[in-house]
Amino acid sequence: MQTVLLFSNRDTICRYWSEVLEGRYSIRLCRDEYDCIRHLHDAPESTILLHINSFEGEIARFMKKVRFEYPQAHLLLLSDVPHFQEGIGLLRMGASGYGNSHLNGDHLEHALSVIADGNIWLYPKFLDILIKESFAPTATQEERKSLSKLSPREREIAAFVAQGLNNHEIAERTQITVRTVKAHITSIFEKLHLADRLSLALYMRQTTP
């Protein structure tokens, strides 16, 4: 069972997250950095669900410490009032995800699932902003032509990735195994010269109508 560290000193936030995730994850509460590091020592592959608004200290320094000492851990940072520029900055510093601290249960579980697969998760409306700011309004002819390198199944899976589905959800939709989904995604990355799911999602949204 995946371990999730709930890092917040606000009781209402911890209670909400615990209620949403209870029974599906191994939950551990962290009130401060010492608690968090102690739990990471026992479970180094944990995902840290960090409440930005109640964090006391310098987040950049804490993130650097986690990345250096526990490289297998993941950081999902959530804010009461998320801002696009803050989110992009935290992703650049090594966060695995960024969004609203009051995400509904389905979205929070989806974010954790995406991150557990080793991918980046971003608050949906921020993903749309990122697409608009990072790409020209229309794809070049060469970029559209690149899609022809993909098989019909690969194009189908790439489209599901662009919708934000994780590997298990794609496997259910396509009636194939998770292992096969991963193999297809690896092939897609190689053919399109992309590095991760976020890049693929941006690429697909820009090159398809």
Image (cartoon, rainbow, N blue to C red):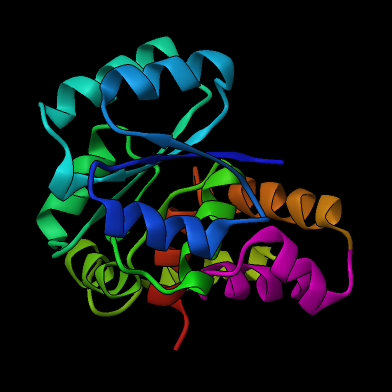
Q: Quadrant of residue 15?
A: bottom left
The spot of residue 62 in percent (x, y) is 23, 22
Residue 141: tell me if it is visible.
yes
Q: Quadrant of the N terminus?
A: top right
Magenta stretch bounds: 151-176
Q: Is residue 161 magenta?
A: yes
Q: Main secondary structure of the magenta part?
A: helix
Up the image or down, 141 lies above or below 196; here it is below
Q: Residue at x 67, y 72 (%)?
A: 155
Q: Residue at x 78, y 72 (%)?
A: 153
Q: Residue at x 24, y 38 (%)?
A: 92
Q: Residue at x 12, y 32 (%)?
A: 56
- Residue 154 is left or right of residue 194, and the answer is right
Up the image or down, 156 lies above or below 87; here it is below
The spot of residue 14 in percent (x, y) is 36, 52
The residue lying furthest to the right in this view is: 176
- Residue 36 is left or right of residue 145, and the answer is left
The residue lying furthest to the bottom in this view is: 209
Q: Is residue 126 magenta?
A: no
Residue 98: tell me if it is visible.
no
Up the image or down, 159 lies above or below 11; here it is below
The spot of residue 95 in percent (x, y) is 33, 39
